[in-house]
Image (spheres, grey):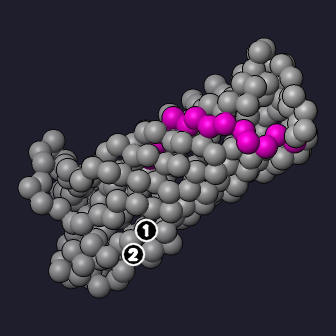
Amino acid sequence: MKRHLVGLLVVVLAASTTVAAPPVNGGFGCFGPTVGLVNFDGLNAAFANGGITQKLESMHWGFGGAGFALIDRVVIGGSGWGGSQTVASDSLRAQVEISGGEFDLGYQVLSMEHLLIAPVLGIGGSGYSIEMQKLAGMAPNFNELLRNPGGTSTVSFSTFSLTPQLMITVPISFVGLQLRGGYCYTPMNPEWGIDNGGKLPTGPTINKGMPFATLNVVFGGFQGGTRRHRGRK
């Protein structure tokens, strides 16, 4: 998730600097909470077999951001996001993180003074990371942990994803709001990797699709070129 967020910051800052660079009609960065509806049945079943009866919530919350430039009616930019949940038993704790990043390309079907609507296709990657930690016999303080590290394992995968979505932006002066909703689809079967670079022959079943919604605060503006309004050419 840290790698995604660093890349996301670069994208947002780069996009926000395009505001004053003609012939770009506008540019803005945005950030805010995102929520996905995830089918965790496969993971929950695997955790139950390992003694964790606590279930992952299907409503998976995270945080993300994006940066976009508007060239006439074309929308171009990038976005990233990530979020995690933790479940545990008396002897084991598991943190499940889902994150991703993508290149976004769209077209404004409606462009008004305070309303922009554009269908957008995101092309990029997403993945899971599951960190499991033994709770029994944990070191009670940091010094003892340094003398006896271990007890934590991580499995993860990343894969290609396609994200069709609808972007509704309400620009108001330098700030505004944006609502994005869509579906993140991963057509390939995951190949789980472990800490030492090896691969697991089998892993928990992961659902290939995740509907999501994001509400962002927008900062930026429109400058250079010509803004088009409905009914004008």
Q: Would you say residue 111 sits in the magenta stretch?
A: yes
- Left or right: 56 in relation to 107: left
In the rendered image of this protein, does residue 129 appear above or below residue 51? above
Which mark, by number, is residue 38? 1
Q: Please give the residue where the numbered disc 2 appears in the rendered image.
A: 56
Is the Cβ of the residue at disc 2 closer than 8 Å to that at disc 1? yes
Name the residue at the left extreme: 201
**Mark 2 nearby-residue class (10 Å; few <14, some 14–19, many ≥20):** many
Residue at 29%, 59% (x, y): give it. 131
Residue 115 rendering spot, x and y as whole percentages: 84, 47
User: x, y (%) of residue 162?
Assistant: 44, 46
Using residue 170 as the reference point, say whether residue 9 is left or right of it.
Answer: left
Element class at badge 1: loop
Residue at image point 90% right, 33% down? 232
Q: Which residues are magenta?
A: 100-112
Is residue 38 something one can see in this rendering? Answer: yes
The image quadrant that residue 87 belongs to is bottom left
Residue 218 shows in this picture: no
Residue 132 spot, x, y in % from top left: 26, 64
